[in-house]
Image (spheres, helix red, strand yellow):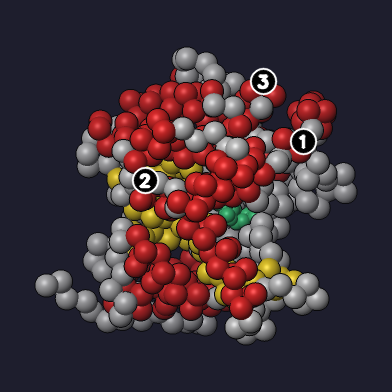
Amino acid sequence: MKKVSKGVFPKKFFWGGAISANQSEGVWNSHGKGPSVADIMMCSKNKDNKNSIITVESIKKNLNDSNNNRYPKRQGIDFYHNFKEDLEIMSQMGINMFRTSISWARLFPRGDESEPNKEGIEFYRKLFQSCKEKGIEPLVTLSHYEMPIYLVNFYGGWKNIKLIDFFVHFCEVVLNEFKGLVNYWITFNEIDSVLRHPFISAGLINEDQTIKNMYQAMHYQYLASAKVVKLFKKEDPHIQMGCMTTGLMTYPFTCKPEDVLIAQKSRHYMYLSCDVQINGRYPISMERYLIEELGVNISEADKKILSESKCDFLAFSYYMSITQGNDKNQQQAYGNTISGIKNPYLESSDWGWQIDPLGLRTLCQDLYNRYNVPLFIVENGLGAIDHVSNLGLIEDTYRIDYTEKHLIQLEKAINEDYIDIMGYLAWGIIDIVSASSAEMEKRYGFIYVDIDNVGKGTGKRIPKKSFYWFKKVINSRGRNITTDKEIGGE
Ligand code: BG6
């Protein structure tokens, strides 16, 4: 029997960080890359920001706007040119996994071509090779809010069934090019988010954002994901395929039955994507609702495809919990593109996201007991405003505190609750542009990047206090996770 050592993370555990292509790479419309949905998103601090209004005209207008400083994702942190140096700094922390995504628009600028952009292929080949050389296992997301904008303009986004074949073709090429270099994959980042932000997740413009279209688009993504999982596993059974959801621990605001019902509905929504991608089928009630009430096109052949392909692990992001109830007068909390009632027992981040480390443990229990597959925390972190001191130091004790509290609960989930957890990846291990607000000011990294909301700055990388703290945590396998206020450098 496998023995657990309380207080210590397992020997076989992935420690690392995660970013996405569209929030980091830059080089948005050169070196063969086409524009993606991310490249038209304005910084939330920009007074002209109308990211919530996405029409054919607004897409055209933003694409023609050559003032890149208004669109921070176009420049990211120029990871495209700096990835070697960035990996080198990251590796000094002792990480053994790095998660990023492959930009579909970098390999297929329009999305529907048959031949890929060779320069894009070479970029990712070098990136994954560099990871391997440093003993860092890449975990690669195949779709992370960055579909080619051409697929929106000419096909209407994921409500169009044709996107399945385009996406599968993109993945086939990726598999052929990078097999042997990448063994861990996630098909869609937070696939459930189609309902929360239908444009960046599925390329649906405002007039197409009906409930039916959103579920249809999500269904087509499930099918695409199932086909890709099957394809990759057939090619190499050792490859590990993950599905990913937005990990949201959900509480009823009170024990009033109405609140409990609302909270339960919200939880069932979170389960949906895991049910489909891990169990290989929709829950019966959901399937009936989608087909009978909304008229979503889900055929018997589709169901067969879903049933033949199951993910190996369940990956999720975890930043916060939400509280649901039916009292409209309660103060609202903000969150990861979802809001709920403010939970009086929790503190909030500068962006109003409610910090709930214990919720992570409860969520792990919930998901593991429901799905019985290994779990993987592929995003967790604190978005905060960092200040660089006159001495050039970034004293982010708040980030250490946040991460430490989550790791303490994770260790308990592993050793006290007997949950199989593959690893922990800190979101934005290096500062990148925020996904929801397209700003640099909201930073998650253990490594500071000197760029501001309008692209000004030297681009210099500076390890923050949390960098040295995380290094110690990894080196000791979390043996003595402490918020060591004295850690300031080496
Ligand atoms: C996750 C996304 O939901 O949240 C990331 O997968 C994103 O892409 C992260 O960056 C944090 O959200 P934000 O909006 O603060 O960047």
Q: Nearer the viewer, residue 440 or 4?
A: 4
Q: Nearer the viewer, residue 255 or 431?
A: 255
In the displayed image of the protein, which residue is found farthest to the front?
Answer: 292
- Report the amino acid beneath label 3: Phe
Q: Nearer the viewer, residue 7 or 228?
A: 228
Pinpoint residue 373: horizontal percent, then vertical percent.
31, 58
Which residue is denoted by mark 3 in the rendering? 154
Which residue is denoted by mark 1 in the rendering? 207
Would residue 487 be visible to someone looking at this image?
no
Mark 2 crowd level (few <14, some 14–19, many ≥20, 10 Å Cα): many
- Under circle 3, the secondary element is helix
Residue drawn at (74%, 50%) of the image: 453
Q: Is residue 219 above or below residue 465?
A: above
In the displayed image of the protein, which residue is found farthest to the left?
Answer: 1
Cα distance, mark 3 to mark 2?
Answer: 31 Å
Q: Please report whichever mark, 1 or 3, sits nearer to the chain's N-terminal start.
A: 3
Q: Is residue 406 above or below residue 374?
A: below
Q: Quadrant of the C terminus?
A: bottom left
Cα distance, mark 1 to mark 3?
Answer: 15 Å
Which residue is denoted by mark 2 in the rendering? 280
Pinpoint residue 115: horizontal percent, then vertical percent.
46, 15
Task: Kindly indicate whether the residue at mark 3 contacts the one at mark 1 (C-beta within 8 angstroms).
Answer: no
